[in-house]
Amino acid sequence: MDRRPIGVMDSGLGGLSVLRVLRRELPDESLLFVGDQGHFPYGTKTQAEVRRLALAIGRFLVRHDAKLMVVACNTATGAALPALQAALPIPVIGVIRPGASAALATNPRTIGVIGTDSTIKNGAYERTLHELQPAVQVVSQPAQPLVSIVEHGQTGTPAAQQAVDKVLQCFATQPVETLILGCTHFPFLSREIQRRLGPSVHLIDPAYETVQTVKQVLTDKHLLAAGGQQRTALYTTGRIADLQAGADKWLAGDYGQCSSVKLDGE
């Protein structure tokens, strides 16, 4: 039994979509979340800059005794996962391979991917999908404006639907059977996205499959916190009030401390 916390990082509030699945699927585990809102957005940064920030957060999580790190950010997974796995003394799990596997499990001929500018430019989803299933057709579409809709608390508004409709226009002429929500912010817009694409399109939130991977790694390495009392601590490099607003909305206010943090070198 290991009661050290699971560390989770994201560029902002999107990682809360993974955190809430972790809380549901692993109710005995304590969680330590870092939202890097002070450097938001990651999607327009260089790969090197995202890698630097992710490594700084990884070191923070290790100093706070995390037993495993979840990179709950597609952009950071694409830019920094190998570097994190090489640099940190704990297991590090990203969201791209689990998301690709979940999409292929729906047996589609054509898969759409929406993500930040960086995630789409990096091509990590397309590479992973073709590695797992070479014949599948992939339609990738940058959806950077949707990240700000979530970060600014505009989900469920007419502005959110308008933004989704505009970003997803390409799928009217390039229809897909399955769509990967390739940014952890996007599950918070799933209703708007489904409304635009129609009920026949499978929406894939990589969070659930990622958490199953976390569960398997913890089991294999004998790191599960059986019978523990779940605690959730939140940290932000930005304004505490912004993280609290997101956590109140998407975690139903069920968390412990919410504090600010400065990363290495700042």
Image (cartoon, rainbow, N blue to C red):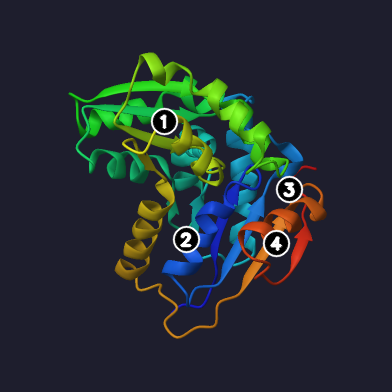
Residue 165: image location, x then y, percent: 54, 25
Mark 2 / mark 3, whichever is N-terminal: 2
Contact between marks 1 and 2 (CB within 8 A): the answer is no
Task: For marks 2 and 3, give the CA distance.
Answer: 26 Å
Task: For marks 1 and 4, give the CA distance.
Answer: 29 Å
Residue 91: image location, x then y, percent: 43, 56
Q: Is 219 situated left or right of 21 in this image?
A: left
| In front: label 1 or label 4 | 1
The residue sitting at the top extreme is 173
- Disc number placed over residue 21 in the picture, else none: 2
| In front: label 3 or label 4 | 4
- Label 3 sits on residue: 263
Q: What residue sits 51% from the left and 78% below the top?
A: 3
Q: Alpha-carbon neighbours of circle 1 within 10 Å: few (<14), some, or many (≥20)? A: many
**Would you identify the image quadrant in which residue 150 lies?**
top right
Give whichever of 143, 215 is nearer the camera.
Answer: 143
| In front: label 4 or label 2 | 4
Mark 1 / mark 3, whichever is N-terminal: 1
Contact between marks 1 and 4 (CB within 8 A): the answer is no
- Label 1 sits on residue: 197
Task: For marks 1 and 3, give the CA distance.
Answer: 40 Å
Name the residue type under label 1. Leu
Residue 244: image location, x then y, percent: 75, 58
Task: For marks 4 and 2, give the CA distance.
Answer: 16 Å
Q: Is 15 situated left or right of 246 in this image?
A: left
Mark 1 / mark 2, whichever is N-terminal: 2
